[in-house]
Amino acid sequence: MTESWNLLISTPLKFSVLLVLIPSLLVIVNAILSAKELGGELGKGLKKVAAGTICYVTLYGTIIIKELLPFETMTDSQARFFFVFVNLFASVLLITGFYQMYKISKKLRLF
């Protein structure tokens, strides 16, 4: 386990995971706390953004697990299907969440 972790640290994957993981966790916490306080349409939009971000963090976690485990957990076709499905689902959640927030900001004439 230590050797594979050292390999992961020495690769650009470690940097990219940290670069994406830390802001993603902050977005999740911020969106959930804001959604609890706001409620309504804006709260629903923030919950969708948080759910989409959670899906993307799950993808990055899966990449790390596949790198660290010495055995195959999924076949190539299963991994492809998983990544495409989760990516599309997360994208739809993010787009609909941001669109809801955009509609509300247009209604409030913030833009």
Image (cartoon, grey):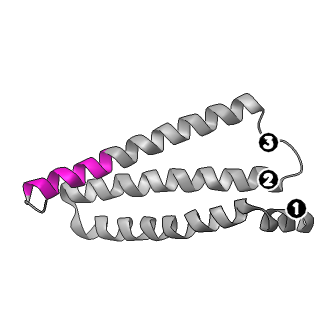
Q: Which residues are magenta?
A: 96-107
Q: Are there few (<14), some (14-19), or many (20+) residues within 10 Å of tag 2?
A: some
Q: Amino acid at mark 1?
A: Ser
Q: How many marks?
A: 3
Circles 3 and 1: CB atoms closer than 8 Å: no
**Who is closer to the viewer here, 11 or 8?**
11
Q: Dot 3: few (<14), some (14–19), or many (≥20) neighbours within 10 Å? A: few
Whether label 2 touches label 1, CB < 8 Å: yes
91 left or right of 57 in image: left
**Which residue is denoted by mark 2 in the rendering?**
67
Foreground: disc 3 or disc 2: 2
Question: Which amino acid does the dot numbered 2 rest on?
Answer: Glu
**Residue 102 against residue 75 in the figure, above or below:** below
- Report the front residue among 50 and 40: 50
Q: Marks 2 and 1, how far apart in space?
A: 8 Å
Reply yes or no: does residue 58 show up in magenta: no
Kindly identify the residue that appears in the image at 68 percent across and 50 percent down.
62
Query: Under tag 2, what secondary structure?
Result: helix
What kind of residue is marked 3? Thr
Mark 3 residue element: loop
Q: Quadrant of the N terminus?
A: bottom right
22 horizontally vs 105: left or right: right
Against 89, residue 26 (above or below) is below
Q: Label 1: which residue?
A: 4
Residue visible at 78% across and 33% down?
75
Query: Disc number at residue 73?
Result: 3
